[in-house]
Amino acid sequence: MKNVLGNKKAIALFVLPGLLLYTIIVMLPVIWSVYYSVYEGTPGLKWNFVGLANYERLFHDKNFHNALIVNLKYIAIVMIGQVGLGLLLALFFRFWLTKFKNVVRTLVFFPVVLPTVAVGQLFVKIYEIQPNYGLLNSILSNIGLQHLVQPWIGQSSTALGALSAMDIWVAMGFYSVIFYGALLDIPGEIIEAAKIDGCNAFNLFRRVLSPLLKPITITCMIFSFTGTVKMFESALALTKGGPGSATKSLSMFMYSVSFTYGKVGYGSVIAVFIFLLCVVGSRLINLFDRKEKA
């Protein structure tokens, strides 16, 4: 191994294929979008160089501001929900669930492999209010909470929350499996020693498990953040961006600008902004991984 790591040609042989693939799949579209962002119109039809005018327009576009606010709210709710509930489920699997572990873990993970459109249609039925009550409104009505029966995805005040609940339900099983694997890697002697020293459940999590799970928590947060920034297919399947623009994300706004209205140059500016949001957000999350000063 030492001879291989000291051989620059061998290192290049291992690194170059992955680097080339990454450049073609990730960096080339980004560079292409930056190039398109200084033009106006549609390539091949009306394509004029406008410099930074598209970027200036971005800061004055109310539709863009609305999509950005919707996206940030969605990221905050869904990221905390997916990672937080995933961690709680993993703790439940590791310390409290004694019977039917494999069956329960499979059921929790099952929504991850379902097609997004199928999940969207399932939750349309759950939130339904006409012609018949869906599952949620039926439960509320039967337990005497008739005043809470409402069109969950038909009004702007609840549509984003309903969409967030669906996406948390879909992905929390994925994060629970990651956290469960990390919990299994923690030596049992450490947990037993903490219990002998008098740690209750809260202190065991706070003083022992939480610090040991910190790297995997950061990784899960980055996974969830980069997934929620895109916010497209689930919103399209459940609400189609509505009602009005209550669940219209940056990706959906970029799509409509580029392909519905044919403004590819301006759409490319939004794509560049989404890329920068991913980079900056991931960097900020990584700041939590800094080692404490001695």
Image (tube, grey):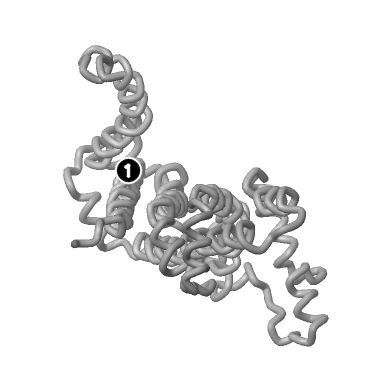
The N terminus: image quadrant: top left
The C terminus: image quadrant: bottom left
Q: Position of residue 180 (x, y in %)?
A: 56, 52
Q: Residue at x 72, y 56 (%)?
A: 122
Q: Residue at x 77, y 68 (%)?
A: 134
Asked whether the viewer can see residue 230, the reply is no
Q: Nearer the viewer, residue 223 or 117?
A: 223
Q: Nearer the viewer, residue 163 or 83?
A: 83
Q: Is residue 155 above or below residue 220?
A: below
Q: Is residue 185 above or below residue 125?
A: above
Q: Residue at x 76, y 53 (%)?
A: 100
Q: Nearer the viewer, residue 185 or 11?
A: 185
Q: On the image, numbered disc 1 is attached to which residue?
A: 268
Q: Nearer the viewer, residue 218 or 122?
A: 218
Image side of residue 169 versus residue 272, left or right: right
Q: Position of residue 286 (x, y in %)?
A: 30, 54
The three-letter amino acid code for the residue at tag 1 is Ser
Q: Residue 162 occupies which quadrant of the picture?
A: bottom right
Image side of residue 167 versus residue 8, left or right: right
Callout 1 crowding tier (Cα within 10 Å): few <14, some 14–19, many ≥20: many
Q: Residue 142 occupies which quadrant of the picture?
A: bottom right
Q: Is residue 34 above or below residue 1?
A: below
Image side of residue 163 versus residue 107, left or right: left
Disc 1 is placed on an element classified as helix
Q: Residue at x 47, y 46 (%)?
A: 260
